[in-house]
Each structure stands twice: as C-alpha cells, then as structure tokens.
Image (cartoon, rainbow, N blue to C red):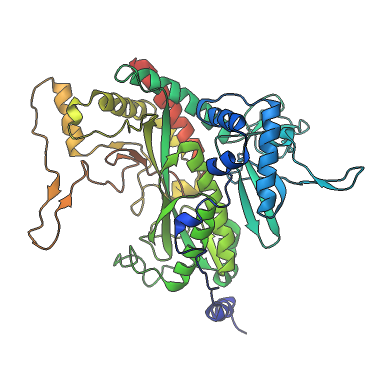
Amino acid sequence: MKSLRTIALKEAQSRISPEVKSPSTKISEFFGSNVFDKKKMKDLLSKEVYEKLISAIDQGVLINQDEANHIATAMKTWAMSKGATHYTHWFQPLTGTTAEKHDSFFEPSADGAIEKFAGSALVQQEPDASSFPNGGIRNTFEARGYTAWDPSSPAFIMESKAGKTLCIPTVFVSYTGEALDYKAPLLKALNALDKAAVDVCQYFDKSITKVNASLGIEQEYFLVDLALYNARPDLALTGRTLFGHMSAKGQQLEDHYFGSIPERVFTYMVDFENEALKLGIPLKTRHNEVAPSQFECAPIYEEINLAIDHNQLLMDLMEKVALRHNFKVLLHEKPYAGINGSGKHNNWSLITDTGKNLLSPGKTPKNNLMFLTFFVNTIKAVHEHADLLRASIASVSNDHRLGANEAPPAIISIFLGSQLADVLDEIESSRSILKKVKNEDSLWLGIPKIPQILLDNTDRNRTSPFAFTGNKFELRAVGSSANSSAPMTVFCLLYTSDAADER
C-alpha cells in the first residue's frame, strides 16, 4: 500500500499552477483600484463633506450624522459600481486574526426591494462580543459589542469567486467602552504620541503642527505544497513540524537566500502582489529568504495605523491566493527545527506634517539637535521599558524563534552603529573631539567601471532586536504571525512617556 507521502508527492508533481497575468502593464494604472481613497472621495462627495472627511482623517474632527449619510451613499454608489452586494465592518479582535460580519445592501420596502446604506450603518455596527477574547473584563452573558468606523483607514473591496464585499475598517469595543481589539489602543497611543512629539518639535520649528508615526513591515513566510501539507497532521494542526528528521540539505550553503525565485513560487507572488496592489498595499520587494522554501515581501512605509491594517489584510490575502496555486502559507515563527524562522520586521520612524523625518540624522548629526532629542528619547524609552517591549512580542511560537538561526535574542537591546555611538560618546564626554567621526560618504572598490557606492551612516545589524538603520529604528523581534499593533502600541506609549519626562 502506498504511503501518504508517496501519494502526496505524486499529486504535487501533477499540479500545475494557474497562469497569472498582470491586470495592466503599469502598476500605477491599477494601484488602489479597489480602495475608496481620497481621489474617489473627492469625485463622489460634495466639496464641503470631502473637506470635513479630510479634517476627520488628519485632525480628528468629528463627523455629524448628515455628513455620515452623504459619505455612506457615496461609498455604496462606488462599491456597487464595482459589483459589491454586501458590506462589513472589518475589525481586529484579540484572536490575532481579522473578523467580519457581512450585511447586504438589499432591503425590502413597500415599493419593492432597494439597495440602502445609511450613515448609521457606516458609523456603527453591533457584532457579538461574548465569544472574543477580553482578558476577563467581560462575563459570557454580557454579549453586546460595538464596531465603530475608523475614517483614517480607507474602505476597500474584497473579491472572491462568490462575490464582492465592501470592507470598512473599524475599532471594536465592549458595551461599557473597553477596547476588545488591537486598533483602539493603537489609535489612542498614536494620538498621545502626536501631541507629545509636536510639543517637542515646537522648541525647534514652530511650523510643525502634527507628527505621524510611520511603519514599514517586512513579512517573512514559508510555502509548502498543499498536498504535502495535508499529508502532515502536525503541520495541519499546529502550523509547525513536531516529528521527522533533518533535511539532507538545509541552509548550510546559503544558496537559497536571494536566489532565483522558483517559477511556481514566482507565479504565486505575482498573483498575490497584484491583488494586494489593487487594495492599495504598496508592495515593493520580493525575494527568497535564507531557509529553503522561505520568502519575504515588503511594502513602502506608510502611516502606522494604515500600515498595520494593510499587513493584516496582506496575511489574509496571501493565504487565500496560495490555495489557487496549491500552496499553503506557513506564518508560524518556527515551523522547522535547525533553520531560520520567520519574523515581521517593523521599521519605525516619525514624520512631521512639513515632511521632515525626525529620525534622519542628516550630514551633521552632532549638530542636529532635534534629531538628537528624539534619538536619545528612543534609546532611553527602550532601555527603561525593555521588559514591556519584550512582553509585547512574546508568544509560544515566537519564543521558539528568538535567539536561534539569525533571529534576534530574547533580551532586548539596541544597536546604533559606530558613527552615532561615537556622536553620543562625544556628547557624554563633553569634549570637543572624543573620537573622530567618519565623514566618508562613498566606498571606492578600485574597479574603474563600477560606480562608487554611497555609504549609509550605520551598518545593518541582522540580529539586534532593535537597531537603528540610517533614518529609522527596526524592531526585528516581532513574530511573523503577530499583529504589529501590540508592540507598536506599547512602544509609542513608552516612548511618549519618556519624551514627556525629557521635557
């Protein structure tokens, strides 16, 4: 009798990935086509309501009921023109995944059926809150919960073979107001960070009135053939291997890293990237990772709330599209022993409304007092509250990864690079020159035909849990399956606390 593995291998070899064609020769022509973005808002809303919505997004101005009705009508008109028949409040409960309850635009009436979407349905909905994790703050019989619209994260349309649904990003709270999700605490932390950072910026530049945290999330993952996955109960039940033996060839030669992407995997990447780009997720990078069958994708940085929404949406999208290609995506942090696990590298910085990156040292970091203020506060915050940051990235699966095979250690520390470490040493010593800071901005290889290489102000550190990488800090300790809201909420709050102490 043939073994399950033999049957699975034969089935896997017979599978052919579907051909994927880009919806356009230019990404710019279809990017964000399934998003109710500012351009579509401007086209479908009156000037007054559009300006009020932009004020709500940028400044937190409240939207009244009449304006909500106007926005809901425009949103429904756009969604139905794209083929959507239902809408849902899309939220992020403490399960680690996203959640949604679909309702139809269709409503019966005395004059016949109509499609309707009121402002009240846009602003607030009521999913059952009794079956979601709440940390013990709610009894099981206390079932009522509310989802409330987050205007700062644009609505989008999810497509499937069965139909299309308008998804509205929301926060999720209990009947008595406790946060039951990841988004509500994050938005509160970002509001506190904005106020504290603007107060500090005002000492240096009075024109700065708002500071946004920015985030770029690199996503690592493994791919397994679906038939082989189904033949492994340990993978199917736990997301990781629990038995077996080491592969005859692992990552000893490092030949998988940045290698030529296998054709079948490449087809899958193009497919899910196209779907992501239509949803406004600005994916920029794809490549082989270090371990066999491990890969990575990465977007351009965005405002932190939007970046996290996009990453949650991306993970869901990757899993759905993988099934089209007879793949299974493994987002577990350590699915295989003896080789690299998967992380989610969070590249964090602060951007002012004047376009200035507060963590960009410039050519003379020693004299850039605004940069040094925020730079030192970041270091102090992590130093004093490393335990909270460590707790925010802790999970059973991630703790298998940390400290092994190029993963950051479980002890939180900061890597600054020699140049900025010298700058801080010089400031601390109160001397005019402690150690000469390198002023090289290029690297000469001695090969005439090769252009000079421009040098960054720090070397990249692959194993530091929290490293400065030129104009941002990179939190590398977050697990690949995690919602980045948890560590980012903690970091923004502890950073805000220390910024306030410094003032």
Looking at the picture, how far across and down is residue 259, in whole percent?
A: 33, 67
Q: Residue at x 27, y 24 (%)?
A: 370
Q: Residue at x 58, y 40 (%)?
A: 41
Q: Residue furthest right?
A: 110
Q: Residue at x 7, y 59 (%)?
A: 446
Query: With 404 as the anchor, is 310 left or right in this view?
Result: right
Looking at the picture, how far across and down is residue 316, in whole percent?
A: 57, 53
Query: With 5 as the anchor, is 414 left or right in this view?
Result: left
Work out whether 103 lies above or below 292: above
Q: Quadrant of residue 203?
A: top left
Q: Quadrant of residue 293?
A: bottom left
Looking at the picture, how far across and down is residue 249, in whole percent?
A: 36, 71
Q: Residue at x 11, y 63 (%)?
A: 449
420 or 366, which lies in front? 366
The quadrant the C terminus occupies is top left
209 or 226, which lies in front? 209
The quadrant the N terminus occupies is bottom right
Regarding residue 210, the answer to whether it shows in the image is yes
